[in-house]
């Protein structure tokens, strides 16, 4: 779809409702129109942005009157024709929330290196929920480099009424894009009037790059599929005949395979490339889908086919900006004083940048956008974005005698860059280190990953390692590096209650995620979360105590421990008790579908290891423990469980490992079968033989469990 896009889902158009007053949680009121409401921010007229959580109430005025405007007869006929096209597409795809009649993206590169991008969209809204996503037309531009305009925007009603563009209502949104991201990019925004289910919208935008920072950096791209069916999805690229376009077309499968190669024609001084798909079916959402560009038909193009120009452009910038000055070098030497190995030096610097350099992005043009700020400046002002932190990391490592390079990537949840063709549209930067034996990656952007772990969004992504001029894939860590280790010591009482001592240790992704979660909670909220946890195990349970270790010290393992009592740990049936081992019952909602169209995409690898030691009351014995089992899945997944019996206790252990991140469609049936079998096994119960003299649950026991 077009790079000039609608406001994000959940964004609410300012028309036909306009805010008269915004009431903040502090009690303060602001009289201003609301441009949009997002999941995290509220944008007011004039570009002011408020955190959504700070807004208590938005008081809206009534529907604006008099917005309808009569169009010339030719345009009225245009509306009738579009409704006919919509009806035909709707018959082929019933039950949709909307229909796209046309998605047409058009690039034109001139001889002088300037270019324009025009986006033409026609769609019909069929359900109320789509109004927010389609209710706003926008076009981004950068002052001093590009300019934008909304060429046309019309809403057609089935009764013949039409509402054309009212230029006076086009707003310019200020540069600030969010609480932690500041940029020079501005946005034109227009709220489509009188939008209602059944309406057809048609709009066209244009962005002209009149001052490109590199005349050869022209990278047109497009995706050809959406959540709604598309009658025609088209990309047209004009370039001067003196130039050649190098392109990569992905996922043109099945009936669209023959359209991966564009139609190419030469007219006058231009060469035209056209990709056009008709009757494109909608994307059908599935759990844990891969990113859009991994499955939808898409094209990326460039004026050259080698990455050398990108390396040549970035290398001198990064070398200059990752050179430690005397102050930074002296600080680094003091920071790593006492570290005995290179690994210890790296960890010390890594944790320092994570915790002391806050993530705030201030991007004022090309140099800071792609090149980042000088590492010495980032260190002094204590904030920066991903590339700023990566440059600082490289500078401090250089001062410590360790080789590294900034590495550019798009995360494994976007995967926008196809490395078959050069591009500059990366969204993130991390660091590749070479200690001589085993080069590895680190990402100093986050605050909560303990060395040597780094955020799972990087796992499996390809990177552009700038200094060595290489494309390097980030490895997915082995399961034991993303492990959750659970240890339960359980003392059963004669009335089938239990005292439980639970301890957990973590590594990698789960450790960082839990550390981040508990750091976000207040002390009383943490206790409440543990009470909810225990209550979910059994009604009438009681939290005795809890402890979080090394929550704020990311140089040490994060650990969690709970003591709690369960009133009903087991179910009694005559002289038999059925005991469900705590936290063992596991479901896998990602394999709920009978079949999949798309690969199953996990965040990263995983290991979950359990150990339960259960002490039995006097006279009780284990009648049947969990069966010993070892299963193996199609992608190297494994599941093991085993139990052993002592004189007055038994111990059961379980280990689930998944080494891979992506399950291809062809492996899904076997993967589903494996996980469903694991799920059934985790629902097994331990059978205990109970003396006849033992009280029933709820009766006062003759002996109580002791910790």
Image (cartoon, helix red, strand yellow):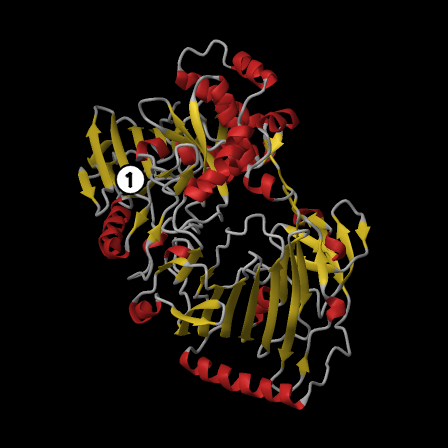
Where residue 477 appears, as percent x and y from the top left, is 34, 35
In this orientation, which residue lies closer to the viewer: 652 or 85?
85
Question: Which quadrant of the figure has residue 686?
Answer: top left
Specify whether residue 299 is in view: yes
- 479 lies above or below 154: above
Where residue 142 appears, as percent x and y from the top left, is 65, 52
Q: Residue at x 35, y 36 (%)?
A: 496
Badge 1 marks a residue whose secondary structure is: loop
Question: Which quadrant of the figure has residue 128?
Answer: bottom right
Q: Residue at x 43, y 17 (%)?
A: 344
In this orientation, which residue lies closer to the viewer: 648 or 200?
200
Q: How many marks?
A: 1
In this orientation, which residue lies closer to the viewer: 458 or 630?
458
Q: Say whether residue 30 is left or right of residue 86.
A: right
Q: Say whether residue 681 is left or right of residue 428.
A: left
- 669 lies above or below 100: above
In this orientation, which residue lies closer to the viewer: 208 or 51?
208
Neighbour tally class for label 1: few under 14, some 14-19, many 20 plus, Cα within 10 Å: some
Residue behind mark 1: 659
Where residue 81 appears, as percent x and y from the top left, is 54, 87
Specify whether residue 539 is in view: no
Q: Residue at x 38, y 48 (%)?
A: 419
Where residue 256 appears, as percent x and y from the top left, is 33, 70
Q: Say whether residue 649 is left or right of residue 337.
A: left
Q: Residue at x 18, y 39 (%)?
A: 630
Image quadrant containing the C terminus: top left
């Amino acid at each position: 779809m077009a790079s000039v896009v609608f406001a994000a889902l959940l964004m609410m158009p300012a028309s036909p409702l306009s805010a008269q007053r915004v009431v903040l949680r502090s009690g303060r009121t602001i009289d201003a129109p609301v441009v949009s409401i997002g999941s995290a921010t509220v944008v007011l007229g004039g570009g002011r942005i408020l955190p959504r959580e700070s807004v208590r109430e938005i008081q809206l005025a009534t529907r604006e009157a008099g917005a309808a405007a009569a169009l010339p007869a030719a345009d009225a006929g245009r509306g009738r024709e579009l409704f006919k096209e919509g009806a035909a597409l709707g018959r082929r795809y019933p039950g949709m929330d909307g229909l796209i009649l046309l998605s047409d993206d058009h690039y034109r590169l001139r001889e002088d290196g300037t270019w324009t991008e025009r986006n033409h969209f026609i769609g019909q809204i069929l359900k109320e929920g789509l109004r927010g996503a389609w209710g706003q037309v926008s076009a981004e531009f950068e002052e001093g480099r590009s300019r934008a305009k909304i060429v046309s925007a019309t809403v057609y009603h089935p009764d013949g009424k039409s509402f054309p563009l009212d230029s006076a209502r086009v707003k310019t949104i200020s540069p600030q894009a969010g609480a932690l991201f500041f940029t020079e990019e501005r946005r034109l925004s227009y709220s489509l009037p009188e939008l209602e289910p059944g309406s057809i919208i048609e709009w066209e935008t244009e962005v002209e790059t009149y001052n490109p920072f590199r005349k050869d950096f022209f990278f047109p791209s497009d995706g050809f599929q959406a959540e709604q069916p598309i009658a025609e999805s088209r990309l047209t690229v004009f370039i001067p005949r003196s130039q050649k376009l190098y392109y990569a077309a992905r996922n043109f499968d099945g009936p669209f395979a023959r359209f991966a190669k564009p139609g190419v024609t030469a007219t006058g001084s231009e060469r035209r490339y056209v990709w056009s798909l008709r009757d494109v079916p909608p994307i059908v959402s599935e759990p844990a889908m891969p990113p859009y560009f991994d499955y939808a038909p898409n094209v990326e193009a460039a004026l050259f086919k080698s990455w050398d120009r990108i390396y040549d452009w970035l290398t001198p910038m990064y070398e200059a900006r990752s050179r430690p000055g005397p102050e930074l070098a002296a600080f680094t030497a003091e920071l790593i004083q006492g570290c005995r190995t290179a690994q210890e030096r790296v960890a010390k610097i890594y944790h320092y940048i994570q915790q002391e350099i806050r993530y705030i992005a201030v991007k004022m043009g090309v140099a800071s956008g792609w090149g980042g700020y000088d590492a010495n400046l980032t260190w002094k002002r204590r904030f920066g974005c991903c590339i700023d932190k990566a440059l600082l990391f490289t500078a401090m490592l250089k001062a410590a005698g360790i080789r590294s390079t900034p590495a550019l990537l798009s995360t494994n949840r976007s995967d926008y860059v196809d490395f078959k063709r050069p591009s500059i549209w990366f969204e993130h930067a991390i660091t590749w280190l070479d200690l001589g034996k085993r080069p590895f990656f680190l990402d100093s952007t986050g605050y909560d990953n303990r060395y040597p772990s780094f955020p799972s969004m990087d796992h499996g992504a390809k990177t552009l390692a700038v200094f060595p001029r290489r494309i390097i894939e980030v490895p997915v860590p082995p399961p034991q590096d993303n492990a959750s280790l659970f240890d339960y010591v359980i003392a059963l009482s004669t009335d089938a209650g239990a005292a439980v001592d639970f301890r957990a240790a973590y590594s990698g992704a789960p450790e960082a995620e839990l550390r981040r979660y508990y750091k976000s909670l207040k002390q009383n909220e943490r206790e409440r979360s543990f009470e909810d946890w225990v209550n979910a195990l059994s009604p009438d349970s009681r939290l005795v105590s809890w402890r979080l270790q090394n929550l704020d010290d990311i140089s040490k393992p994060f650990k969690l421990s709970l003591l709690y009592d369960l009133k009903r740990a087991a179910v009694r049936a005559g002289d038999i008790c059925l005991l469900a081992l705590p936290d063992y019952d596991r479901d896998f909602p990602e394999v709920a579908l009978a079949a999949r169209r798309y690969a199953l995409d996990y965040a990263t690898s995983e290991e979950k290891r359990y150990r339960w030691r259960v002490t039995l009351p006097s006279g009780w014995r284990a009648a049947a423990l969990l069966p010993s089992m070892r299963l193996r899945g199609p992608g190297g997944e494994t599941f093991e469980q085993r139990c052993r019996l002592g004189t007055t206790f038994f111990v059961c252990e379980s280990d689930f490992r998944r080494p891979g991140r992506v399950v291809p469609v062809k492996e899904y049936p076997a993967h589903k079968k494996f996980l469903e079998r694991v799920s059934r096994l985790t629902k097994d119960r331990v059978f205990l033989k109970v003396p006849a003299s033992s009280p029933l649950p709820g009766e006062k026991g003759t002996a109580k469990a002791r910790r």
